[in-house]
Amino acid sequence: MTGPDRPLRLVPAAGPVDVGGPSRPALLAAVDAAVGVLTAHLARWAALPPRWRGVPAGPDTDPATVARAGAQARELPDPVALAEQADALREAADVVRRQHVDTAEDLGPLWDTWAGPSADAVQRRVSALARSAHGLVGELGDTADVVDTAAGQVAAAVRDLAAGAAAVRPADPVGGLHPAQVDAMLAAVRTDPGVERPLRAWAADLEERLRLFLGAAARSRAAGREAGARVRERLAAAGPLGPPVSPPGGGPPPRSGPPSP
């Protein structure tokens, strides 16, 4: 009679995944502040003579576009939570591996003393369980790697979005002008030629801040969706594994628990 199947492979530890960046509350606060500045000033920007603007009016200069970008920022998951989910998957794989090893050690002495049809049947069952355990450990480890990669990708998206929000510089008056000053100049557009130069500078500053924010928002949204798609694809291929994993970008987690052998 042959002995039980080979020991299960160890699950590699997580590689270096950079999930550093602002906390979720800090990120959303920065985004909200940027959205507030941009939407308030874009309403004034729309009142400028078109020839004083650096870019034409359109969807990207609509306050609703900025507000939507701010709302979509809430779809980005917390990369730290994703990394913790990957760790939980690796821990689940280690639990399966330890249980398999313990069972093999407990049954080991039987293979030297027990023979016959019943022993063969038990050993076939144990071998089948071992193969299931091998597959489960591999699936859990591979899924953890995908979730870890998603965590790093989302973290980079969070840092990019935070930089875009910071580029709006909410504490810094746009073009060096406070809203009341802009309103006074807009009221004098038809009567005071001297307001053209400062309003052109104000518009250019606002447009640059808007460009940086919307660019970062679009990139972060795309990166978050890509990360979510990879995790969902992996979960669909692997089936229900270990602890629940929430895919980035929403969607229900799979049912927890290993499949029946």
Image: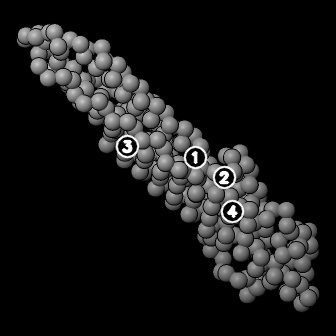
Alpha-carbon span between mark 2 and mark 4 = 10 Å
Image quadrant in which the N terminus is located: top left
The residue carrying mark 3 is 142
Alpha-carbon span between mark 1 and mark 4 = 16 Å
Which quadrant would residue 186 be assigned to in this image? bottom right
Mark 2 is on which residue type?
Answer: Gly
- Tell me residue 29's x, y (percent): 74, 50
Is disc 2 in contact with disc 1, using a CB cutoff of under 8 Å? yes
- First in sequence, mark 2 or 1: give its number: 2
The residue carrying mark 2 is 21
Q: Secondary structure at mark 3?
A: helix
- Tell me residue 119's x, y (percent): 13, 12
- First in sequence, mark 2 or 3: give its number: 2
- Coloration mode: one colour
Mark 4 is on which residue type?
Answer: Ala
- First in sequence, mark 3 or 1: give its number: 1
Q: Classify 107 as above or below 159.
A: above
Residue nearer the viewer, 128 or 172: 128
Q: Residues within 10 Å of mark 1 (few under 14, many from 20)?
A: many
Alpha-carbon span between mark 3 and mark 1 = 18 Å
The residue carrying mark 1 is 79
Q: Residues within 10 Å of mark 2 (few under 14, many from 20)?
A: some
Q: Secondary structure at mark 1?
A: helix
Q: Secondary structure at mark 4?
A: helix
Is disc 2 in contact with disc 4, using a CB cutoff of under 8 Å? no
Residue nearer the viewer, 196 or 227: 227
The residue carrying mark 4 is 163
